[in-house]
Amino acid sequence: MDFIRVRASSDGAETISYWTGDVYGWQDDDGPHHLFGFEGLNAARAVESPDGGWRLLTREAALYLDPASREVLDTWHNPLTGREVEVQHVFNDPVNQRLGGYPVPRTRLGGQVVFNVDVRLAYPSPLKVADYPDNSASDTYRAMELFQFFVSAADLDSGVPDVSCVFSWCRVSPWLPWMAMAQRGGGLVYHCRGAKVPVGEVPERLRERVGEHFLHAPAEFSAPNMSSWTAFAGKAAR
């Protein structure tokens, strides 16, 4: 599967994807506002599934940044509510996928090939409004994750197991639980870009902050996946 060679490596080698970008928010009749910078990484390994197709074994970590200084935030003054809140960075382990049931759409643009993965999400929220009135917008989690992976057509045709790529990522989501926005109308848009890179090209600040564990992919497939919503629920339960 060509996309496996683009997203990870078909020989089972670990790959690192690094991204950087920004997060914007809007309320009904207000905004959009530039709320955060954002940078992170995903460590991935692709393995063939016993029942056909592929399994993508990954974990990821990302940091919310001051939008002007790009310094890592530990607390944040929410300009939309006036409240000071503790920032909960992204430490999702695992983030696994099963691939191979359908072809990933591709578009040839001159000497490039673009793979697009549009993920539309709607499922029961792990944060019910009745239980988390300050942190949950709805009993249904609704979001979109929109990816584009850009590769050289010559690299793709070469047959190498690990095809170099750059990518864009846009995410449309509800307010983050730790923002304490309750059921206010509006939401967030993430706009990021990145590439598969050697681990040494990941910014040192990010490597140090996330730790060695998040620089390596999981060894085995497991479920369920971790998200900012399940992480918040777990932290609140402790």
Image: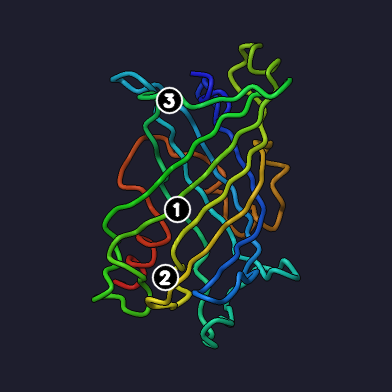
Q: Position of residue 30 (x, y in %)?
A: 57, 76
Q: Nearer the viewer, residue 60 or 137?
A: 137
Residue at x 63% of width, y 67% of height:
36
Instruction: Work out whether 202 lies above or below 53.
Output: below
Instruction: Work out whether 80 lies above or below 229.
Output: below
Instruction: Work out whether 19 lies above or below 221.
Output: below
Numbered-mark total: 3
Residue type pointed to by label 1: Asn
Residue at x 58% of width, y 34% of height:
15
Kindly identify which residue carries mark 2: 177
Near mark 3 (Cα within 10 A), the count class, few <14, some 14-19 or many ≥20, is many
Alpha-carbon distance for marks 3 and 1?
A: 20 Å
Q: Position of residue 147 (x, y in %)?
A: 55, 41
Splitting the image into 4 quarters, where does residue 51 fall?
Answer: top left
Splitting the image into 4 quarters, where does residue 130 fall?
Answer: bottom left
Name the front one of labels 3 and 2: 2
Kindly identify which residue carries mark 1: 92
Alpha-carbon distance for marks 1 and 2?
A: 15 Å
Residue at x 63% of width, y 71% of height:
33
Q: Secondary structure at mark 2?
A: helix
Q: Residue furthest left?
A: 130
Residue type pointed to by label 3: Val
Q: Secondary structure at mark 1?
A: strand
Q: Residue 47 shows which numbered tag?
A: 3
Near mark 2 (Cα within 10 A), the count class, few <14, some 14-19 or many ≥20, is many
**Left or right position of 149 against 143:** right
